[in-house]
Image (cartoon, rainbow, N blue to C red):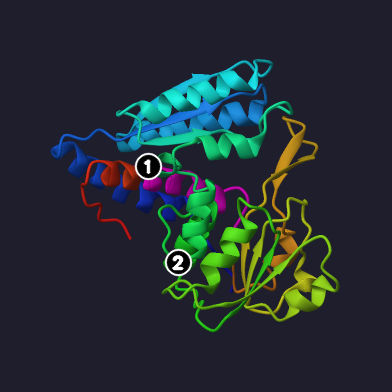
Amino acid sequence: MTEIIDGEAVAADVRDAVAGEVTRLGDAGVAPGLATVLMSDDPASETYVSMKQRDCEEVGIESFHVEIDADAPASELYETIDDLNDRDDVHGILVQLPLPDHVDKRTVLRRIAPEKDVDGFHPENVGRLVAGDARFKPCTPHGVQKLLDAYDVETEGADAVVVGRSDIVGKPMANLLIQKSPTGNATTTVCHSRTEDLEAKLAGADIVVAAAGIPEFVDGSMLKAGATVIDVGINRVDADTEKGYELVGDVDYESAKDVAGAITPVPGGVGPMTRAMLLYNTVKAAGRQHDVEIELD
């Protein structure tokens, strides 16, 4: 019987733990604060930022939001980041991606103070992650680790395949899986658009993390019986629904769930964990900046 990995339930546990740490910070005179910056007219980005603001309110984190016109010069965004870096009441900064074409993403990520980079994308934080001394683990890969741990998925000695090599998910996910840790020690292969014979790589995988950004790219015929399948993808595809579309992952869920030992649904799997781990990182950041020990795993 395939086990359905409930990301909503695990995320709720993370939020409860974060709320407890927010209370402890408050007792020390610290009110953790997260600033979100939106420079886009993309409805999906606007929705995602609104969800993050609601998450903050739920656990007691102060939420600050800045909207910048998508046609504004890049310098306006850079100056906004500089201002947030200097604010003592802002402990974490998240600039919502994607950005307009005239704004250089790498410049933006480097502009955020590393100690406030709760996405974990600043080069300094990436380097610390690779070195095994992470200040912040990127939210989605860390959320995947939490799911694996919550469902007692054995990573030590397991063969893991990460499908996708993005800076946001694929690369940090592989780094976390290979590191010496209770949720690491896996033998990890990273596959991508130039990988030959992907099916052969997947056929031997005990753990599959699908993060290619291609709807239903991995199907049940590619999987090893009993594999744990973590579907990071969330894609809109045309469908005969009231909205005119439906959300699907990078895995063909219907065929995969008949083969997998455990699998995340879309939605309700990795997505809630990504948002929960942002709160986790924000509280960690506040504790470090005020020299208050945070008791989160």
Numbered disc 2: secondary structure: loop
Q: Residue at coordinates 70% horizontally, 78% vertically from top-left?
A: 224
Quadrant occupied by the C terminus: bottom left
In this view, the residue in front, 169 or 135, is 135
- Give the answer, above or below, for where 216 lies relative to 106: below
Residue 106 visible somewhere in the drawing: yes
Q: Amino acid at mark 2?
A: Gly
User: Picture coordinates of residue 257 (x, y %)?
Assistant: 67, 66
Q: Which residue is mark 1?
A: 282
Horizontal placement of 209 versus 35: left or right?
right
The quadrant of the picture occupied by the N terminus is bottom right
Q: Check disc 2: other Cα within 10 Å, few if <14, some if 14-19, many if 20+.
A: few
Answer whether residue 277 is magenta in the image. yes
Q: Earlier in the sequence, mark 1 or mark 2?
A: 2
Residue pictured at 43% horizontal, 52% vertical: 136
**Residue in the image at 75% along x and 78% along y:** 203
In the image: residue 182, left or right of residue 2: left
Predominant SS along the magenta part: helix
Tell me which segment is drawn in magenta. 263-282
Q: Tag 1: residue type?
A: Thr
Counting from the top left corner in percent of width and height, residue 77 is at 56, 23
Marks 1 and 2 sit apart, C-alpha to C-alpha, by 20 Å
Crowd band around label 1 with a 10 angstrom C-alpha radius: few (<14), some (14–19), many (20+): many
Q: How many marks?
A: 2
- Can residue 269 be seen? no
User: Height in image: 1 above or below 129?
Assistant: below
- Looking at the image, which residue is at 37% across and 52% down? 14
Badge number at residue 132:
2
**Front one among 188 and 51:** 188
Foreground residue, 197 or 110?
Answer: 110
Which residue, as the protein is rendered here, is positioned at the far left? 27
